[in-house]
């Protein structure tokens, strides 16, 4: 893998760290540097591999797997059908 590809992966991983609120409010993701986080109080662990995001909620046995992009202060999480949900950095 080229150095540029590693840099892109690191940028996405570090870029997702922080607090993100659904564009119309009410739903908030928090991604911590240590691979833990929460969604409206539901705790999870997560991994990032390129543009792939895998979230394992506490108590679940199957992770939520999706793709995402970050553009400035906007986090775009795609569902299994490719529909976007936009979150704004807080």
Image: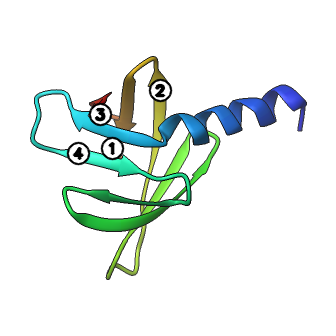
Specify the color scheme.
Answer: rainbow
Closest to the observer: 24 or 64? 24
- Residue bearing the label numbered 3: 83
Above or below: residue 84 compared with residue 32: above
Where, by quadrant of the figure, is residue 10 drawn?
top right
Of badges 2 and 4, nearer the viewer stands 4
Which numbered marker is on residue 15? none
Closest to the observer: 65 or 20? 20
Of badges 4 and 3, nearer the viewer stands 4
Q: Report x, y in % for residue 85.
A: 27, 34
Of badges 2 and 1, nearer the viewer stands 2
- Residue at 30%, 47% in the rendered image: 29
Q: How far apart are marks 2 and 4 (CA)?
A: 16 Å
Label 3 or label 2, whichever comes before in sequence order: 2
Q: Distance between the residues labelled 2 and 1?
A: 15 Å
Above or below: residue 51 compared with residue 71: below
Mark 4 surroundings within 10 Å by alpha-carbon count, few (fewer than 14), some (14 through 19), many (20 or more): some
Which numbered marker is on residue 79? 1
- Residue bearing the label numbered 4: 28
Q: What element carries label 1?
A: loop
Mark 3 surroundings within 10 Å by alpha-carbon count, few (fewer than 14), some (14 through 19), many (20 or more): few
Label 2 or label 4, whichever comes before in sequence order: 4
Above or below: residue 44 compared with residue 85: below
Q: Distance between the residues labelled 1 and 4?
A: 17 Å
């Amino acid at each position: 893998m080229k150095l540029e590809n590693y840099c892109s992966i690191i940028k996405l991983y570090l870029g997702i760290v922080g607090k993100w609120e659904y564009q119309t409010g009410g739903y908030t993701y928090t991604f911590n540097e240590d691979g833990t986080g929460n969604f409206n109080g539901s705790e999870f662990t997560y991994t990032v591999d390129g543009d792939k995001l895998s979230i394992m909620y506490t108590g679940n046995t199957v992770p939520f797997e999706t793709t995402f992009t970050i553009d400035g202060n906007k986090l775009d999480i795609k569902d299994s059908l490719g529909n976007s949900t936009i979150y704004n950095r807080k």
